Image (cartoon, coloured by chain):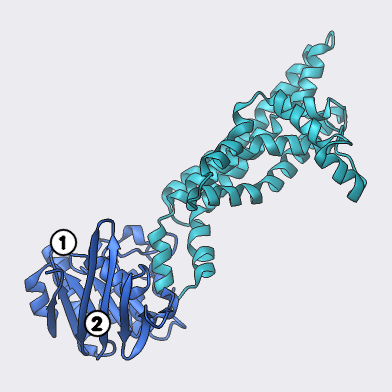
């Protein structure tokens, strides 16, 4: 693996990893709310969460660009309070990847939370467990395979992110140029075919690895035991 | 009186409830399917909030609409054996049994009485219906409850398993440690096990 290729892979994994870890906790909270709560406007929240899944990625990227621009609502706050900007930075690429992966992660976790039998929590309560102990010892471990599957799915989605990323933080080698963006750049370059082949092969290998891990997790979830 | 219950709640359009007092030993509430037997036990366990009335066990108020008392299930010291066992699928039998227990000192004794000592390292999904039922009874007993609720503990068991479960309940009853409230639709079962029988939902 050339030095350059190694750098691209490392950046891709960094962005995918950070995006997944950052999106996981809020995605779990939203999945929990959608699975367990009833409130007016739930349909609206559900729709809002799924927006990045259905609108063109370039639109999501554009919205992020407006929000995080120096004069934008989020960008101005970051600038003033932290003195940082995420534009053209890997952090911005991670934000784009996290936003795009968010709905997929919520879906996976919502399903697994809904699949936990609430009557088991009731049983735990009658055995002397308070709300939190019942949650930590019953609900959380029983939905853990779904959380793990969501993380793998989110990671796979993140390392493949293209449209929103290139619109939001552009294609900066060494900073925002992940595997898909590097493939795109190589395609634009005359004589870049060999480079495309190599990058594509690595890309497929990474995605396949993520898929296999997720498959194993789902199978283990199917057994319904030995979760923790 | 061990049990002093007078409650009612709405389940959809139907009202369910009961009013009775009962002493020590095993009290059987007999009623047809749909008479609200499970709802009644849920109310006593704190899983369903009655619309009115009171629930007292051995003089302790678990619920009293007038006085604004409504203890959460974990503070009622209830041992509730559900009709569907509700064992925790991600924990072995031993961990299920000890979930509500302070320590494992009584584990062996309870396992012997219920004849489940050989099952301790098994997973719940590998148990037969009768075995799961007995583990559920053991789990409730080991949480050191002040009273025991049994919801149709013999239903959907074949005759041999039924006899096993019936004997297990008789042994728990005859130990006389806690008052037991059991609901069933089966009159013969009620007559064999119960110190007294109270019809409900009529």
Say which of marks 2 and 1 sits in front: 1
User: Spatial distance from mark 2 to mark 1, Cα to Cα?
Assistant: 21 Å
Host chain of mark 1: B
Query: Mark 2 sits on what residue?
Result: B180
At x 48% / y 51%, what residue is drawn?
A38
Relative height, residue B36 to residue A162 (above, below): below
Host chain of mark 2: B
Which image quarter holds the C terminus of chain B? bottom left
At x 44% / y 60%, what residue is drawn?
B90
- Residue B83 rendering spot, x and y as whole percentages: 26, 65
Q: Let me know if residue B107 appears in the view.
A: no
**Drawn side of residue A168 relative to residue B164, left or right:** right
Q: Earlier in the sequence, mark 2 or mark 1?
A: 1
Per the image, label 2 sits on a secondary structure element best described as strand
**Drawn side of residue B3 relative to residue A40, left or right:** left
Q: Let me know if residue B145 appears in the view.
A: yes
| Mark 2 touches mark 1? (CB < 8 Å) | no
At x 65% / y 37%, what residue is drawn?
A101
Query: Mark 1 sits on what residue?
Result: B33
């Amino acid at each position: 693996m050339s030095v350059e290729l190694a750098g691209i892979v490392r950046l891709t994994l960094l962005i995918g990893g950070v995006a997944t870890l950052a999106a996981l906790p809020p995605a779990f909270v939203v999945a929990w709310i959608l699975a367990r709560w009833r409130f007016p406007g739930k349909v609206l929240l559900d729709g809002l969460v799924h927006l990045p899944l259905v609108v063109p990625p370039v639109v999501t990227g554009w919205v992020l660009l407006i929000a995080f621009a120096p004069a934008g609502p989020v960008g101005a706050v970051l600038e003033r309070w932290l003195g940082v900007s995420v534009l053209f930075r890997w952090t911005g690429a991670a934000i784009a990847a996290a936003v795009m992966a968010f709905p997929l992660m919520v879906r996976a976790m919502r399903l697994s939370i809904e699949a936990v039998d609430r009557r088991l929590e009731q049983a735990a309560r009658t055995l002397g467990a308070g709300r939190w102990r019942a949650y930590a010892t019953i609900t959380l471990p029983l939905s853990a395979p779904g959380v793990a599957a969501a993380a793998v799915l989110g990671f796979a989605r993140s390392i493949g992110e293209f449209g929103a990323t290139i619109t939001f933080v552009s294609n900066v080698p060494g900073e925002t140029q992940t595997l898909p963006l590097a493939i795109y750049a190589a395609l634009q370059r005359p004589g870049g075919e060999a480079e495309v082949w190599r990058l594509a092969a690595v890309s497929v290998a990474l995605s396949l690895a993520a898929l296999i891990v997720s498959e194993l997790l789902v199978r283990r979830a199917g057994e319904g035991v030995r979760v923790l | 009186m061990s049990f002093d219950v007078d409650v009612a709640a709405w389940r959809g359009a139907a009202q369910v409830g009961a009013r009775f007092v009962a002493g020590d030993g095993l009290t059987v509430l007999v009623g047809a399917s749909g008479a609200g037997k499970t709802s009644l036990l849920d109310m006593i366990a704190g899983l369903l909030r009655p619309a009115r009335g009171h629930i007292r066990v051995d003089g302790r108020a678990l619920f009293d609409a007038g006085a604004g008392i409504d203890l959460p299930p974990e503070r009622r010291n209830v041992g509730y054996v559900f009709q569907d066992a509700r064992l925790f699928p991600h924990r072995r039998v031993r961990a299920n049994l000890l979930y509500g227990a302070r320590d494992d000192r009584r584990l062996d004794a309870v396992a012997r009485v219920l004849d489940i000592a050989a099952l301790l390292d098994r997973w719940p999904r590998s148990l037969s219906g009768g075995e799961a039922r007995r583990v559920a009874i053991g789990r409730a007993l080991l949480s050191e409850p002040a009273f025991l609720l049994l919801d149709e503990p013999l239903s959907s068991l074949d005759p041999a398993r039924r006899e096993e479960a019936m004997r297990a309940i008789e042994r728990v009853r005859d130990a006389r440690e806690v008052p037991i409230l059991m609901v069933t639709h089966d009159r013969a079962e009620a007559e064999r096990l119960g110190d007294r029988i109270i019809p409900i939902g009529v």
